[in-house]
Image (tube, rainbow, N blue to C red):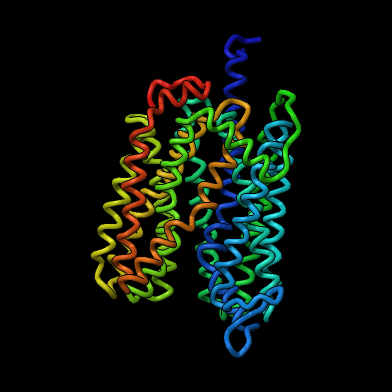
Amino acid sequence: MDSGTVRTPAADQAAGRRREQRGWYFYDWACSVYSTSVVTVFLGPYLTSVAEEAADADGFVRPLGIPVRAGSFFAYSVSLSVIVAVLVMPLVGAAADRSGRKKPLLAAAAYVGAAATTGMFFLDGDRYLLGGLLLIVANAAQSVAMMLYNSYLPQIAPPEERDAVSSRGWAFGYAAGSLVLVANLVLYTAHDTFGVSETTAVRICLASAGLWWGAFTLIPLRRLRDRDAPARETTLPGFRQLAATVRDMRRHPLTLAFLLAYLVYNDGIQTVISQASLYGSEELGLGQSTLIGAVLLVQVLAVAGALALGRLARVYGAKRAILGSLVAWTVTLAAGYFLPAGAPVWFFVLAAGIGLVLGGSQALSRSLFSQLVPPGKEAEYFAAYEMSDRGTSWLGPLLFGLTYQLTGSYRDAIISLVAFFMLGFVLLARVPVRRAIADAGNPVPDRI
């Protein structure tokens, strides 16, 4: 054999790792369309209109005999999906770590979510209960699948590669979200040209996200591989497993300290994402087309932002890059407070600022947390991480709502969210990440 074609075991291992990483990126490509097109853009207004169609003269629907305002049904369904996810994630995470078989569990969660999303095509007339059920199933399944997906990161990338790998994953997700959202918006705005009604166009957009999710999930399922896990005690049920995971995390207080900081500043991020459209429509008087265009701009620029912040992390370290992004979030919100009403251009400038820091702050937080997880407990710990993302996102909306109730100003409400970024900055700055990585039993990279 020619010496130029000889492959060393290290080269083979690196090639296998690259193959897994490329497959891993494609799960973000697969599932992010659900978050963008379904949750952020189309489902909330559409499910609310379906519930209003089924409402009585007083504007109430009555699932299981409980009176619920039609306008609140979507929000309550999202909240219930969070509760379901919080109950299921620790159980699935522990099972994945104990068996070493993450891929079948990832496949099950992904295809349950994709099937529920595809089923939204049949959401019409007054079938609000069907819509609520499908939303709960899809949202909870996405949380479980993302927890398993995230837990692969420590296994497919050594510490020095994780910031870049995590950033590329986020970039793939935002790129897919942008691509499909453009196609959906073409169908939605020109539905007459395609010979379909507006409601049919929305149902096609919803179902297409599920088909996309299911089709592209095949790529990571072909390329990711399971690792053997040491035999452990059997998985505990529900809250007992969650309590056991929390007890174990108490043995790693610095990991918990980072998780607390992430919980705080990410709650601010999630609230900005969910309330920006409300701020644009109610305070700034902007139309639906402007708001949807701003969502698309955020998606596009988040690709560049995730990759750019990943490069900064290689130079300055992930912790400093995240701290810098929190400063940028604070400046962006402060600028948003002064936006003039009825000026779409400045709202697009605000959306651009959000997009540039959104992907990077989330990607680097994921990669940094992956280095604080004890080996062999990736899925369990990422269940707690995912719950800090979804399970506590009521804090920001609560502060936003209370501020508006007390002041009557959405400007005051949006600027109140600065508190999450300032407190998150202080908490993260106090975490000695090098010692935290070492205490978790992981090798400490040269730059962190």
Quick one: quadrant of the C terminus? top left
Q: Is residue 60 above or below residue 239?
A: below
Tell me where residue 395 appears, x and y as whole percent.
Answer: 45, 56
Task: In this rendered view, identify the residue nearer to me: 290 or 339.
Answer: 339
The reply to whether residue 236 is visible in this rendering is yes
Q: Is residue 194 above or below residue 97?
A: below
Image quarter for residue 27?
A: top right
Image quarter for residue 200?
A: bottom right
The residue lying at 54 percent from left, 76 percent from top is: 71
The residue lying furthest to the bottom in this view is 57
Q: Is residue 309 above or below residue 81?
A: above
Tell me where residue 213 appears, x and y as whole percent.
Answer: 64, 53
The residue lying at 54 percent from left, 59 percent from top is: 180
Task: In this rendered view, identify the residue nearer to me: 315 or 374.
Answer: 374
Quick one: quadrant of the N terminus? top right
Task: In this rendered view, identify the residue nearer to me: 269 or 16.
Answer: 269
Tell me where residue 132 appears, x and y as whole percent.
Answer: 65, 68
The image shows a total of numbered marks equal to 0
The residue lying at 34 percent from left, 46 percent from top is: 423
Task: In this rendered view, identify the residue nearer to me: 41 or 374.
Answer: 374
The reply to whether residue 167 is visible in this rendering is no
The residue lying at 40 percent from left, 58 percent from top is: 272
Q: Is residue 335 above or below residue 248?
A: below
Question: Left or right: where does residue 352 sit relative to residue 39?
Answer: left
